[in-house]
């Protein structure tokens, strides 16, 4: 469904274009309100996310008000890098106190506190120069001075009427609250301390002071990510805007790099080329951006980071990668293994070495009776040396201590050493050492754990328990019930051994360290069961994201956040399904396209690829869902297709007899063809209304009321439009759709503005 928030191209059913045209000068101002580089003139309800912060000034049905008197409020208003502190009477720009006179300050405060509407010249003069007769030129001068500080776009002139503050996303905070700064994702929590690496921490801190980009390179499992996490936490307070953590799964596709960055910064970039949008959004930030696991898409990261270095001077980058980016701004720090003593040392001294400390820490976590002492320190040092100080290998080995004891563990390693040395003559020595270390440690795990670990390697990023159990239970001989219990046991075991990480949150999610995942993925490929695992993974993701997608008309924000969490895995599932399972691919297209925040082009690729797979053997409701969602997808090049798909969706849904799908399709189609075929639309709307039932989803009611409002605007009946928008807002609130609530609030405000300008006593206001 589409809600328009400005003038839309003729023929695609936007807000009544003629209406605006009749107030020509005002239209220009209103377009200026929407002239942010990423705001489109019309927005699809279904293809956009619901993520909004502060809706307090837009709650449904609330009239524009003068509730916040500029004089009495103690609030702080935060937008872009600007903070307006009412009680302190200060304006901070980029953290610096701006030089602003008291009249200009009052003026700005008045505009910001009434940002939900236009403020007339009389109101402004009355607020800023109370009880004084002043020339209007004074106002013009003060407005010009504010524009100098905040940019020309910040305050829009509505000729003959007054001014409107037009920076979106103002946060209102009380004196003690911290601004939300777009909520960058924090580094994944890791409770275990960083061991050793004191010198590296110091060195990276120093490098980051001098260089824009620092890349930690080194073999998989050596400890790059762990070090980057520590640095991220440690250095974050030194940056005004803190830090953001961006995780690129190794399976990443280069086009997703910007997507991942935007997600970490909670930005919504919708454009065919989102890079300029990202550059713009970051230009005034002062932050540390950590990007983990760069190697698989190093060239794409290089391009983006290079561009951001040019445009965002306050951002520093810390990357982890097996290979450097090789861009001019980059400084590479090659990470060696954790330090291992060269000979036997007393316990206290041995623990100064990272490798020994890590072994002791993990062994103790497994078995609280374990302690490093004079009797075992020599053997532990020997094990660490055998494992070349490679963190991941040490962790895996240490997790077996409780079962084998230190001595037996050392012996088991020796035996495997002989075995592996004889078989791996072809591999270069450096790699061989690493592989050997990992193979050894892995060989020490129980068979059930090895099986579980390699199966879980099909996940990218984090995954739910539900999905994990589907993937783990591949043994057809067991009953489904007992297989799930076995899966649960295996997962518990892996979590206990720290091979699978539990992420905080409710319900918890799980993930493998990328180093572990890569290693386990190789095991999976060698095991011959990769294809069946991928199939189970894809089917699990299909089930999960479709269930969320179905909730969107009742609980939009929740459903959308849920799909966002599953997006990496859903896309992974899609890429498998595109070559192996057309039905699953077609089923995955709507929820994934809906969940994609930034990349319209990525979504377009998905629509195109799955369109080619459609076939008449597929179930009706699958094709109907696909067509209905495709008709909503809004990239201009897809436009001619939309009408075709909207009609197809109606036919297909009619065939299924499912009323909600049909209602949705009818409402969509009548939005799309409102201008071109009004008679047909009337029939569709009548058909949709006939399907109304008591438990109808509030999201559908919101759509219906919006259609009503647009029609009223087209007919020039602003009063009826306002009433319908208010109704749509209430329904949108009931469907927990904060995104659409914001759009509707804006439309409502505009309709009210139209109403106000058309009242004769206001025309001559200035
Ligand atoms: N200095 C360290 N202190 C504690 N644990 C570490 C340290 N370095 C690595 N580890 C652990 O070893 C494992 C592999 O490290 P990781 O950072 O994922 O390697 P990489 O990113 O280089 O592939 C992880 O479980 C990590 O927590
Ligand atoms: Mg890593």
Image (tube, rainbow, N blue to C red):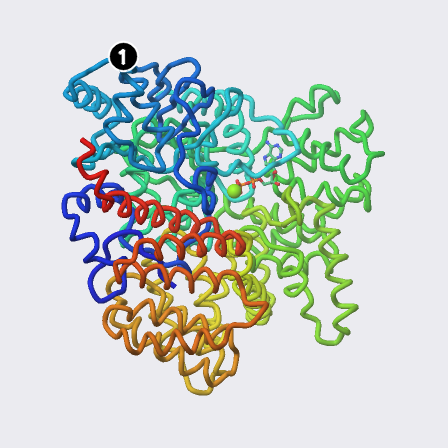
Task: Spot the residue most to the front.
Answer: 761
Quadrant of the rendered image containing residue 530 = bottom right
The residue closer to the viewer here, 599 or 353, is: 599
Query: Is residue 758 visible from the viewing direction of this image?
Result: yes
Query: Is residue 528 visible from the viewing direction of this image?
Result: no
The residue closer to the viewer here, 609 or 558, is: 558
Which image quadrant: the N terminus?
Answer: bottom left
Q: Is residue 66 above or below residue 275?
A: above
Q: Is residue 26 above or below residue 649?
A: above
Residue 751: horizontal and vertical position, in percent? 31, 49
Residue 36: horizontal and vertical position, in percent? 27, 42
Question: Residue visible at 54% across and 64% down?
Answer: 697
Quick one: SS at disc 1?
loop
Q: Is residue 413 above or below residue 362?
A: below
Residue 273: horizontal and vertical position, in percent? 27, 51
Q: Is residue 379 above or below residue 737?
A: above
Question: Residue visible at 69% across and 53% down?
Answer: 443
Which image quadrant: the C terminus?
Answer: top left
Mark 1 CB near ligand 2 (8 Å cut) = no
Q: How packed is label 1: few (under 14 Cα within 10 Å), some, or many (20 or more)?
A: few
Label 1 sits on residue: 101
The residue closer to the viewer here, 101 or 255, is: 101
The residue closer to the viewer here, 712 or 407, is: 712
Quadrant of the rendered image containing residue 383 = top right
Residue 581: horizontal and vertical position, in percent? 49, 76
């Amino acid at each position: 469904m589409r809600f328009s928030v400005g003038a839309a191209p003729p023929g695609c059913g936007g807000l009544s274009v003629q209406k605006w045209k009749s107030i020509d000068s005002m239209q220009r101002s209103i377009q200026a309100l929407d002239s942010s580089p990423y705001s489109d003139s019309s927005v699809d309800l279904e293809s956009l996310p619901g993520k909004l912060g502060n809706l307090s000034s837009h709650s449904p049905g609330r009239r524009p008000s003068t509730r916040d008197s500029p004089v009495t409020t103690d609030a702080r208003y935060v937008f872009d890098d600007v903070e307006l502190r009412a009680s302190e009477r200060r304006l901070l720009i980029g953290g610096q106190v701006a030089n602003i006179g008291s009249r200009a300050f009052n003026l700005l405060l008045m505009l910001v506190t009434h940002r939900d509407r236009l403020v007339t010249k009389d109101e402004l003069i009355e607020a800023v120069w109370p009880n004084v007769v002043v020339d209007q030129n004074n106002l013009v001068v003060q407005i010009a001075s504010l524009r100098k500080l905040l940019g020309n776009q910040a305050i829009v002139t509505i000729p003959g009427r007054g001014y409107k503050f037009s920076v979106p996303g103002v946060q209102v905070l009380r004196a003690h609250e911290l601004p939300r700064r777009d909520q960058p994702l924090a580094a994944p929590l890791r409770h275990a301390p960083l061991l050793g690496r004191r010198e590296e921490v110091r060195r990276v801190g120093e490098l980051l002071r001098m260089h824009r980009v620092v890349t930690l390179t080194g073999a998989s499992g050596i400890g790059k990510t762990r070090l980057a996490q520590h640095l991220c936490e440690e250095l974050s307070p030194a940056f005004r805007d803190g830090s953001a953590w961006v995780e690129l799964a190794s399976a990443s596709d280069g086009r997703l790099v910007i997507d991942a960055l935007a997600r970490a910064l909670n930005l919504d970039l919708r454009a065919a080329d989102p890079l300029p949008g990202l550059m713009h959004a970051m230009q005034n930030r002062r932050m540390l951006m950590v990007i983990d696991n760069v190697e698989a898409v190093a060239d794409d990261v290089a391009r983006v980071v290079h561009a951001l270095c040019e445009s965002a001077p306050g951002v520093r980058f810390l990357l982890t990668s097996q290979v450097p980016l090789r861009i001019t701004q980059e400084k590479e720090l090659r990470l060696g293994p954790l330090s291992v003593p060269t000979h036997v040392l007393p316990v206290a001294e041995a623990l100064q070495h990272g490798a020994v400390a890590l072994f002791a820490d993990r062994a103790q976590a497994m078995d609280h009776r374990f302690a490093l002492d004079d009797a075992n320190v020599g053997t532990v040092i020997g094990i660490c040396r055998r494992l070349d100080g490679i963190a991941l290998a040490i962790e895996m080995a240490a997790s077996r201590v409780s079962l084998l004891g230190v001595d037996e563990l050392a012996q088991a390693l020796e035996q495997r050493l002989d075995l592996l040395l004889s078989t791996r003559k072809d591999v270069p020595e450096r790699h061989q050492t690493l592989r050997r270390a990992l193979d050894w440690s892995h060989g020490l795990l129980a068979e059930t754990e090895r099986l579980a670990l390699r199966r879980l390697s099909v996940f990218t990023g984090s995954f739910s328990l539900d999905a994990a159990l589907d993937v783990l239970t591949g043994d057809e001989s067991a009953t489904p019930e007992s297989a799930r219990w076995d899966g649960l046991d295996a997962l518990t075991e892996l979590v206990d051994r720290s091979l699978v990480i539990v992420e905080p949150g409710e319900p918890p999610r799980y993930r493998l360290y990328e180093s572990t995942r890569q290693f386990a993925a190789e095991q999976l490929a060698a095991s011959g069961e990769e294809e069946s695992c991928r199939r189970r993974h894809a089917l699990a993701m299909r089930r999960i994201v479709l269930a969320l997608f179905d909730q969107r008309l009742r609980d939009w924000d929740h459903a959308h956040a849920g799909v966002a969490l599953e997006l990496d895995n859903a896309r992974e599932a899609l890429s498998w399904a595109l070559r192996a399972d057309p039905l699953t691919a077609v089923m995955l297209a709507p929820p994934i396209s809906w969940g994609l925040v930034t990349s319209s082009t990525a979504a377009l690729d998905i629509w195109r690829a799955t369109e080619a797979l459609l076939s008449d053997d597929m179930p009706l409701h699958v094709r109907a869902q696909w067509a209905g969602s495709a008709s909503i997808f809004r990239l201009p090049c897809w436009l001619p297709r939309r009408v075709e798909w909207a009609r197809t969706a109606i036919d297909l849904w009619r065939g299924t007899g499912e009323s909600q799908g049909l209602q949705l399709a009818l409402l969509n189609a009548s939005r799309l063809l409102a201008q071109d075929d009004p008679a047909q639309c009337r029939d569709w709307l009548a058909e949709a209304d006939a399907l109304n039932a008591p438990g109808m989803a509030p999201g559908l009611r919101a759509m219906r009321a919006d259609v009503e409002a647009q029609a009223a605007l087209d007919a020039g009946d602003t009063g009826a439009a306002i009433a319908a928008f208010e109704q749509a807002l209430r329904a949108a609130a009931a469907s927990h759709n904060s995104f659409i609530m914001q759009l509707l609030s804006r439309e409502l405000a505009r309709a009210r503005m139209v109403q106000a300008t058309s009242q004769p006593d206001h025309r001559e206001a200035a």
